[in-house]
Amino acid sequence: MGLPVALAVAFLLARGRFPGRAALDALVHLPMVLPPVVVGWLLLLLFGVRGPIGALLQDWFAIRLVFTANGAALACAVMAFPLMVRAIRLSLEAVDPGLEQAARTLGAGPLDRFLTVTLPLAAPGVLVGGIVGYAACLGEFGAVITFAANIPGQTQTLPLAIYAALQTPGGEAVAARLSLVSVVLAVCGLLLAEWAGRRLRRRVGR
């Protein structure tokens, strides 16, 4: 869900020239340098039931994010977002602008150039961004437990479930099984990414 937004923001930062670009760049990368617990606390301030955004969502759409599964997803997405943007941005900046200019001289509009030239050439970087985001979400702990808590069956992610199991006497076996599930998910994601990356490289090389 966050990948299209990350692609749009990465393109804006890579190609855009506008006032406040440096401020946007700093804001996007802020979760990378802040402790995850601080990010979760800031999410509580913004999206809590009394926060400026959370109150509007609650009053207008009856949407509540804090201490919900959607809130856990939001916390993971926020932590993964700068990693995805960075990977995609580097890939976009590596695309030869001359190819886009050549497409422009042939009559291709901005959207056509992006879809037929820029995006295919940057596709490996977009894939890397998706993988990094997936990995970050799979292991996120601090922001999730601060913003969404650790509610079994609702907001409890794999890292939270492993932590809870380790805090329970005799829970080592449960923690080991959950850790195995985490390893399997990570390996499957890496294998799928490698397969998709090879296909993308073959297509770009044609």
Image (tube, helix red, strand yellow):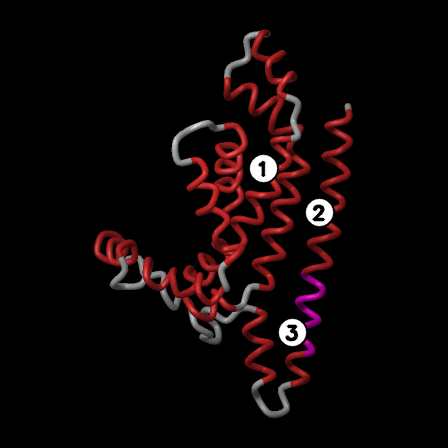
Residue type of the residue flagged with mark 3: Leu
Q: Position of residue 14 (x, y in %)?
A: 54, 32
Q: Point out the image quarter for the C terminus.
A: top right
Determine which of the numbered discs, if any, sits on residue 114 in the image: none
Q: Is residue 62 above or below residue 102?
A: below
Q: Which residue is mark 3?
A: 178
Residue 179 among magenta residues: yes
Locate residue 148 relative to residue 89 in the image: left or right: left
Whichever of callouts 3 and 2 sits on the residue coming sooner in the sequence is 3
Pointer 2: what residue?
193
Q: Residues within 10 Å of mark 1 (few under 14, many from 20)?
A: many
Q: Specify the label residue 89 is tagged with.
A: 1
Q: Secondary structure at mark 1?
A: helix
Q: Residue at x 61, y 25 (%)?
A: 118
- Give the image location of residue 200, x and y in percent: 72, 34
From the viewer's perspective, is residue 7 above or below residue 78?
Answer: above
What predominant SS class does the magenta segment belong to?
helix
Closest to the observer, 84 or 70: 84
Above or below for 37 versus 52: below
Q: CA distance from mark 3 to mark 1?
A: 34 Å
Determine the CA span between mark 1 and mark 2.
19 Å
> Where in the figure is residue 55, as x and y percent of width and height?
25, 58
Residue interval drawn in magenta: 176-185
Q: Are marks 3 and 2 in contact (CB under 8 Å)?
A: no
Characterize the local packing of mark 2: few (<14), some (14-19) or many (20 or more) Cα atoms within 10 angstroms: some
Report the mark closest to the observer, 1 or 2: 1
Q: Residue sitting at 49 percent across and 55 percent down?
A: 31
